[in-house]
Image (spheres, rainbow, N blue to C red):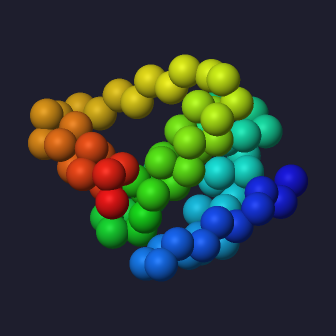
Amino acid sequence: MQWPVIFYQKNTLRDYQNEAVARGIENERVLFLSPTASGKSFTIYLLSRYHVENGRRVLIIVPTINLVSQMQSDFIE
């Protein structure tokens, strides 16, 4: 499945992000393991946005309060 690539002023999807989003949509869930600064928050945002726009609710679980703040600021950007 090829998910449409979304272009933003600062961000474009890398191949592995596109694959993660496509698999997340196909399987309705995905476990995404990736190194620091590889765009995980952006990938999570795209998956969340897709599901919310399709009338689903999204739950994101992170292990620390700092990551909650980071995800919030990433989503706002």
**Could one spot residue 69 in this view of the protein?**
yes
Instruction: Please state the horizontal and vertical placement of residue 50, each as a whole percent of the image.
Output: 64, 41
Instruction: Please state the horizontal and vertical placement of residue 5, each as a whole percent of the image.
Output: 70, 67
Residue that lies at the very extreme toward the left in this rendered image: 66
34 left or right, relative to 26: left
Q: Nearer the viewer, residue 3 or 76?
A: 76
| Residue occupying image coordinates x 64% and y 35% | 53
Residue that lies at the very extreme toward the bottom in this rendered image: 9
Position of 39 relative to 66 (above/below): below
Can you tell which quarter of the image residue 56 is in?
A: top right
Position of 64 relative to 17 (above/below): above
Q: Quadrant of the C terminus?
A: bottom left
**Could one spot residue 16 in this view of the protein?**
no
3 left or right, relative to 57: right
Instruction: Please state the horizontal and vertical placement of residue 27, each as a whole percent of the image.
Output: 74, 33
36 left or right, relative to 43: left
Can you tell which quarter of the image residue 39 is in?
A: bottom left
Q: Nearer the viewer, residue 73 or 65?
A: 73
| Residue occupying image coordinates x 53% and y 39% | 48
Can you tell which quarter of the image residue 17 is in?
A: bottom right
| Residue occupying image coordinates x 51% and y 26% | 58
Position of 29 relative to 5 (above/below): above
| Residue occupying image coordinates x 35% and y 28% | 61
Instruction: Please state the horizontal and vertical placement of residue 8, each as a whole percent of the image.
Output: 52, 72
42 left or right, relative to 28: left
